[in-house]
């Protein structure tokens, strides 16, 4: 351990406030930082209250898990409520985007507005030198012409890399942030958790909407957005069904359409075709579907993105890069055109499948995440 990393100039320990969710990743993060010599304080964020007693919202159990871990690791922990900030900064935008027919990624906005803004501000009020989370990503300081700059890098474990969700972080946020898990694998995290006896060592990873949890999605949206049924139309203009409202569907979706056995579209073996959502026409409230995964309507050679955010706070030079248009997608070779702020255009070597307005297009130069924007 480099004592200079975890010590202040006066010789005291640097203070790190760790976002502890009750999951194994943030728990091991807290332990690693304490082992490295930091003064660690845990902070549990409560950001959703509408149905906190439902089967899908596990806030109480998560808090109990986080507190139990803090006891084992030997750190203080406090709970803080950011529900108002979450509703104003994240959830309101989430509903606006769905109402407009787009498919937002709440984790991206949640990171930028809550975990690395509201949480960071609160941590600084506690005298923190840094914050830390259990994200799989890395931060690297580099010397530039104007001084030290910070790069956001993919995690060494590319199967768990979460830089896609973090691409809106800026220099001030990265300067204060530690990602201890960026250099190790998920298997190693589990091994450490078992070795040190963490009570949540075998806890399942959380999925679903950021801070809201896993739940039947259409049923959940139904509570906040009105249903507005309309026609489901094929690429040939044939009406094959009725949708519940365009907000409840996303491009590339194949499940939950209710049109599997449309007359005249059965295969020789009696099974129906596989339908995919290909277009949403808001003006006529029409949902268009196509048969087959590789239908031309589902493939795009280019995309445009707005609401741009660059990690270095200035646009990269036009040229060849790689991009992701959805999480867990393999990097796709592309060319960045001349950036006309606040938008950019990407041209892909191979056509991209189901490029979805509202999702994020994130640009990479090797392992370096350059930033990105919201697909238009």
Image: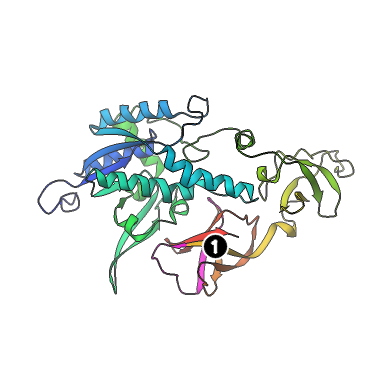
Q: Position of residue 161 (x, y in %)?
A: 44, 50
Task: Kindly identify the residue that appears in the image at 50 percent across and 35 percent down.
Answer: 213
Crowd tier of the residue under label 1, counting other residues whose Cα lies within 10 Å: few below 14, some 14–19, many 20 or above: some
Location of the C terminus by quadrant is bottom right
Residue at the far right in the pictured view? 264
On screen, residue 72 above or below 178: above
Task: Kindly identify the residue that appears in the image at 51 percent across and 46 percent down.
Answer: 106
Task: Report whether 281 appears left or right of 356.
Answer: right
Q: Position of residue 276 (x, y in %)?
A: 73, 48
Is residue 12 visible to the viewer in this orientation of the structure?
yes
Residue at the far left in the pictured view? 10
Residue underneath mark 1: 306
Task: Kindly identify the residue that appears in the image at 50 percent across and 38 percent down.
Answer: 207
Task: Report whether 25 appears left or right of 356.
Answer: left
User: Main SS of the magenta segment?
Assistant: loop
Please name whichever residue, 52 or 348, is drawn nearer the observer in this view of the structure. 52
Please name whichever residue, 221 or 2, is drawn nearer the observer in this view of the structure. 221
Q: Is residue 311 magenta?
A: yes
Q: Quadrant of residue 20?
A: top left
Q: Quadrant of residue 217?
A: top right
On screen, residue 49 above or below 301: above
Q: Position of residue 117 (x, y in %)?
A: 37, 49
Q: Is residue 253 magenta?
A: no
Which element carries disc 1, helix, strand or loop? Answer: strand
Task: Kindly identify the residue that appears in the image at 26 percent across and 28 percent down.
Answer: 71
Q: Identify the magenta region.
A: 309-328
Q: How is the image coloured?
A: rainbow
């Amino acid at each position: 351990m480099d004592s200079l990393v975890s010590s202040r100039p006066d010789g005291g320990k640097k203070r790190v406030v760790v976002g502890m969710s009750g999951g194994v990743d943030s728990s091991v993060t807290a332990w690693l930082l304490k082992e490295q010599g930091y003064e660690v304080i845990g902070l549990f964020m409560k950001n959703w209250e509408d149905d906190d007693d439902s089967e899908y919202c596990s806030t109480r159990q998560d808090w109990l898990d986080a507190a139990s871990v803090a006891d084992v690791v030997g750190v203080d922990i406090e709970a803080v409520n950011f529900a108002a900030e979450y509703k104003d900064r994240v959830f309101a935008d989430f509903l606006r985007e769905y109402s407009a027919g787009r498919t937002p990624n709440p984790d991206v906005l949640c990171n930028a507005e809550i975990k690395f803004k509201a949480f960071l501000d609160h941590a600084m009020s506690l005298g923190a030198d840094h914050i830390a989370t259990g994200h799989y990503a890395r931060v690297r300081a580099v010397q530039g012409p104007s001084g030290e700059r910070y790069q956001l890098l993919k995690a060494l474990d590319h199967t768990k890399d979460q830089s896609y969700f973090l691409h809106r972080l800026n220099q001030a946020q990265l300067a204060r942030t530690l990602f201890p898990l960026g250099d190790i694998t998920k298997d190693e995290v589990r091994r450490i958790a078992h070795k040190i006896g963490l009570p949540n060592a075998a806890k399942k990873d959380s999925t679903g909407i950021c801070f809201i949890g896993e739940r039947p999605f259409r049923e959940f949206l139904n509570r906040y957005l009105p249903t507005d049924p309309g026609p489901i139309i094929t690429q040939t203009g044939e009406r094959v069904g009725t949708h519940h409202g365009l907000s409840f569907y996303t491009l590339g979706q194949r499940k939950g359409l209710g049109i599997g056995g449309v007359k005249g579209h059965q295969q020789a073996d009696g099974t129906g075709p596989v339908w995919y959502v290909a277009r949403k026409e808001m003006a006529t409230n029409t949902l268009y579907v196509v048969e087959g995964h590789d239908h031309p309507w589902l493939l795009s050679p280019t995309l445009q993105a707005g609401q741009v955010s660059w990690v270095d706070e200035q646009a990269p030079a036009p040229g060849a890069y790689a991009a992701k248009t959805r999480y867990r997608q393999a990097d796709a070779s592309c060319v960045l055109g001349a950036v006309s702020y606040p938008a950019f255009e990407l041209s892909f070597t191979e056509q991209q499948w189901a490029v979805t307005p509202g999702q994020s297009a994130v640009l990479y130069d090797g392992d370096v995440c350059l930033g990105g924007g919201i697909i238009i």
